Image (cartoon, helix red, strand yellow):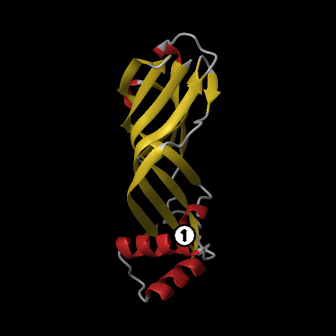
Amino acid sequence: MITITISGYGAEVTHGKLPATVIDEIYENLGTTTPSREELAEYLTECEFKGTHFSWYDIDDVYHSYGPYLNEAMITVRLNDTVVYNRECIALNIDETETAEIDPFAGNLLLDAYGVLTCEDVVKGQLQKYVLSTEKDFDVKQLKLQVSTLGDYSIITGIKYKNKLYNSEDDGDADSQGFYVNLHE
């Protein structure tokens, strides 16, 4: 049996269009039309925990991903509880899916009265665990990481081993390291 864990830094990242009416409501609730990123992050976090009608992770019509950052995580492979591979994830082969960021200043976006909201909830710890119960040996050349990319974000979302796709069985044990917000209108 092969067990694969990926640990380090990662995040849940969302990116999407935010209607101007919601932006106006946020500004009204904050009492300013020029909130700092910290004020905006605090407001969005409070909305999430208060169960209001607005939640940052629902503004994801373009992108929503959770997992380890490709360039800030380590992968450990155990074969029958013995470590047989331990290395930075960036050293492995990847299958990458790229998503284009919304340009808030392009085309009709301004005419449609939308802003663009990108949120990043950074975490650190063991982020993914895969169990390949039918495998009896391990060949690193047969392992590929599934990576979802948006701009500078490259997030591991799964693995392929011997061309079979695996999803994480466990989102691990990670602690929050910070919540960051970028709003363009």
- Residue 135 image-quadrant placement: top right
Which residue appears at 56% of the width and 61% of the height? 57
Which residue appears at 59% of the width and 75% of the height? 113
Q: What element carries label 1?
A: helix
Q: Which is nearer the eye, 44 or 129?
A: 129
Placement of 166 over or under 125, stated as above or below = above
Which residue appears at 49% of the width and 27% of the height? 4
Q: Which is nearer the eye, 71 or 106?
A: 71
Placement of 123 over or under 79, stated as above or below = below
Residue 130 position in % (x across, y down): 55, 30
Work out which quarter of the rendered image holds the N terminus and state it: top right
Which residue appears at 52% of the width and 63% of the height? 106
**Can residue 159 be spotted in the picture?**
no
Placement of 158 over or under 59, stated as above or below = above
Residue 64 position in % (x across, y down): 57, 52
Placement of 125 over or under 134, stated as above or below = below
- Residue carrying label 1: 48
Residue 112 position in % (x across, y down): 62, 72
Residue 174 position in % (x across, y down): 43, 48
Q: Which is nearer the eye, 27 or 124?
A: 124
**Can residue 177 be spotted in the picture?**
yes
* Count of numbered badges drawn on the protein: 1
At label 1, counting other C-alpha atoms closer than 10 Å, the crowd grade (few under 14, some 14-19, many 20 or more) is some
Q: What residue type is labelled 1?
A: Glu
Quick check: 71 left or right of 162?
A: left
Q: Which residue lies furthest to the front in this view?
A: 81
- Residue 18 image-quadrant placement: bottom right
